[in-house]
Image (cartoon, rainbow, N blue to C red):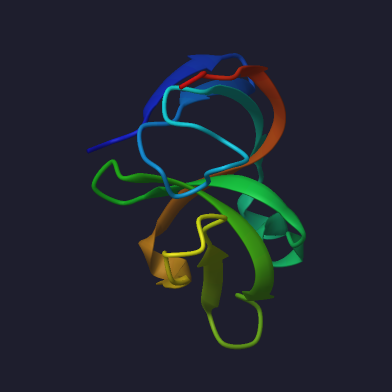
Amino acid sequence: MKTEYIHANEQVIFITNDTSMMPQLMPGSMLSGHYIETYLWSKQTNGVFAILLDGGIVLIRRVKENELETKGILTLYSDYRKNTSEVVTADQIHSMYMIDEIMKQAVY
């Protein structure tokens, strides 16, 4: 299932659709993020990001290890303990957004 997103100038609004970032972000939460220029991707760590992959897949994940500059990979972490980390390569990434704000938190 794809995460929904809406463009508004350089801000983008994302609506989560899975449990990968629970308990911090429940499915249906609305998040605001800003666009990260391609040349700055390798500098991004210690935050929650929306990573848009080729094919329209959007992953909302935490970035702790960024080896885009040295190895061409980015390790993405889920806050949900049962999920494992994911590694994506630089050529899989279409765009990247840093999540700035939880605009609406879904309640279950």
Residue drawn 52% across and 46% down?
21
Residue drawn 55% across and 71% down?
74
Q: Name the residue nearer the viewer: 18 or 33.
A: 18
The relative height of residue 68 versus residue 108 in the rendered view (above or below) is: below
The relative height of residue 18 versus residue 106 in the rendered view (above or below) is: below
Residue 40 in percent (x, y) is at 72, 56
The relative height of residue 33 versus residue 87 in the rendered view (above or below) is: above
The relative height of residue 2 versus residue 7 in the rendered view (above or below) is: below
Q: Name the residue nearer the viewer: 88 or 41.
A: 88
Residue 5 in percent (x, y) is at 42, 23
**Figure disc tally:** 0
Residue 41 in percent (x, y) is at 65, 59
Residue drawn 57% across and 42% down?
23
Residue at the far front: name it. 108
**Quarter of the image where one finds residue 83:** bottom left
Q: Name the residue nearer the viewer: 3 or 6.
A: 3
